[in-house]
Amino acid sequence: MNFNQTILVGRLTADPEFVKLGNINKLTFVLAVNYKKKEGAEGVDFIPIVAFSNLAEIGNKILSKGALVLVKGKLKISKYKDKNGINRSSTDI
């Protein structure tokens, strides 16, 4: 059973970036997701999305800037050191 599941609906902020990594396809894009704050104001989160293999190939053919999409995936937090040796983290779906 997978408890790490995220579902988002939003629009692509730019055309996706497609890369072939050997025999694996990789597609990345940023999803703008709107939400309402407690005080009634609206906000936007910008969520990095990564897709691989066949899903990346299909997405590359049909997605473009402004497209409204539903994304279902796993939340991933990566930890690394930057070029100055400072600990950093990044989050994507």
Image (cartoon, helix red, strand yellow):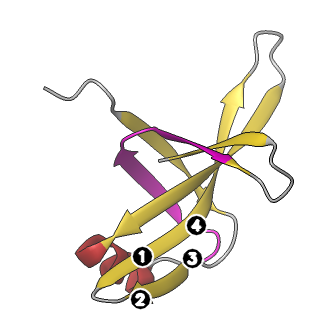
- Residue under label 3, please give it: 16
Local SS, label 2: strand
**Circle 4 Cα neighbour tier, 10 Å, few/some/many (<14 / 14–19 / ≥20):** many
Q: Is residue 4 above or below residue 40?
A: below
Closer to the N terminus: mark 4 or mark 2? Answer: 2
**Image position of 6 (left or right of 24):** right
Q: Nearer the viewer, mark 1 or mark 3?
A: 1
Cα–Cα span, label 3 and label 2: 13 Å
Q: Position of residue 76 (x, y in %)?
A: 46, 41
Cα–Cα span, label 2 and label 1: 6 Å
- Amino acid type, label 2: Lys
Closer to the N terminus: mark 1 or mark 3? Answer: 3
Cα–Cα span, label 3 and label 4: 5 Å
- Amino acid type, label 4: Phe
**Image position of 16 (left or right of 59):** right
- Residue under label 4, please give it: 29
Q: Is residue 45 above or below residue 3?
A: below
- Amino acid type, label 3: Pro
Q: Nearer the viewer, mark 4 or mark 2?
A: 2
Q: Position of residue 16 (x, y in %)?
A: 57, 76
Q: Which residues are drawn in magenta?
A: 65-80
Badge 4 vs badge 2, beta-carbon distance below 8 Å: no
Cα–Cα span, label 1 and label 3: 10 Å
**Circle 1 Cα neighbour tier, 10 Å, few/some/many (<14 / 14–19 / ≥20):** many
Residue 60, quarter of the rendered image: bottom left
- Residue under label 1, please give it: 26
Badge 2 vs badge 1, beta-carbon distance below 8 Å: yes
Cα–Cα span, label 1 and label 4: 10 Å
